[in-house]
Image (tube, rainbow, N blue to C red):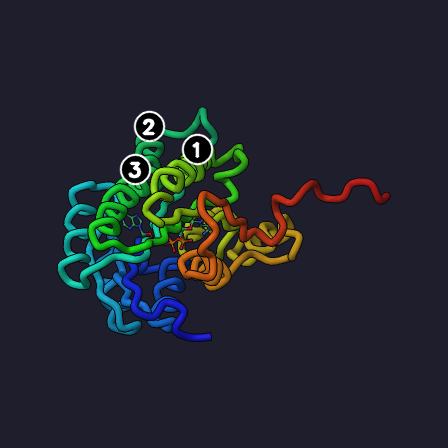
Amino acid sequence: MTGRLADKTAIVTGGASGVGKATCRLFAEEGAKVIVADVQFEKALAFAEECGGEARLLDVSREEQWRELADHCLEEYGKLDILVNCAGIGRAGDFESLTAEDWNAMVGVNLNGVFFGCKHCVTAMRKSGAKGSIVNVSSVAGLVGGEDIAGYSATKGGVTMLTKSVALATAKYGIRCNSIHPTYVDSEMLDDVAERFPSRQAMLDGMASLVPLGRVAKPIDIAQAILFLASEESSMITGSPLLVDGGQLAGLPSRHNG
Ligand SMILES: NC(=O)c1ccc[n+]([C@@H]2O[C@H](COP(=O)([O-])OP(=O)(O)OC[C@H]3O[C@@H](n4cnc5c(N)ncnc54)[C@H](O)[C@@H]3O)[C@@H](O)[C@H]2O)c1
């Protein structure tokens, strides 16, 4: 299928890597004008040239940069239809060992970044009369806790709830807002984690053993679900958490068969 996002303008944060990158590529293939927004500008620029989008330097934790980006979008494209809040960072640590610096960094990017993005992009969508769609990338860790990822889980849980409040507040304008909850995704985000294992493959095998479908996700697995929520195929869905977790949160593993 092609043209599912024909005539749409989309901002994708974290668009230079992993899930965001796969999403930008898919959106462009489906006919959208894509703004690849990332704090890693050189990577965003190189990729934007490849996928036919526009690169923008954006630190999602800085509200003034969001205001500028939303204004630019209206000036350049006349409207904003889709926002994907995909930028995110992870810092491991249980709640006793986690430093204030790491906690604040995750709150700044994962939670404040999504708040600023929703706020300024809803304003832009309303100004241009677009019946927009916002997709916030949370995590399975935004639905359940994680012993050694206390701060990450707290910020992603915040995204889950913020999504519902935004959905309720914007439904009257025809704007939708949903969250995506991936299991482990084989992306650069796992590079630091891999260093604590004998090999990257050993880390991935261990993670896959916790997923009923038997593998970790690829960025395209998540991008396909984001495309569905961004497109008009999901026009009756808002305030909804969509799990893309290979069954990880469906229930308890079997312990009753010898
Ligand atoms: N990889 C996983 O296992 C996994 C699992 C569940 C959810 N997620 C979530 O998926 C999303 C995408 O992660 P990924 O796996 O593609 O990771 P990634 O590290 O490959 O990509 C993250 C991107 O976000 C950008 N970014 C970081 N801080 C930023 C900032 N302040 N402003 C703008 N951009 C910034 C990075 O430059 C990078 O391009 C994140 O929100 C992450 O929390 C990832």
Between the residue at mark 3 and the residue at mark 2, the CA separation in whole angstroms equals 16 Å
Nearest the eye: 138 or 176: 176
Question: Where residue 220 sits in the image (x, y, percent)?
Answer: 47, 64
Between the residue at mark 2 and the residue at mark 1, the CA separation in whole angstroms equals 14 Å
Identify which amino acid the numbered label 2 is placed on. Answer: Ala
- Check disc 2 and report the residue beneath it: 100
Question: Residue sitting at 35 percent across and 41 percent down?
Answer: 110
Labelled disc at residue 177: none
Q: Report whether 113 appears left or right of 247.
A: left
- Foreground tag (3 vs 2): 3
Q: Report whether 126 appears left or right of 97.
A: left
Q: Say if disc 2 is inside 8 Å of ligand 1.
A: no
* Whether residue 92 can be seen here: no
Q: Earlier in the sequence, mark 2 or mark 1?
A: 2
Question: Where residue 159 sits in the image (x, y, percent)?
Answer: 40, 39
Q: Report whether 43 appears left or right of 213.
A: left
- Check disc 3 and report the residue beneath it: 112
Vertical side of 215 occupied by 195: above or below = above
Q: Secondary structure at mark 1?
A: helix
State which quadrant residue 227 falls in. Answer: bottom left
Please count the marks in the image: 3
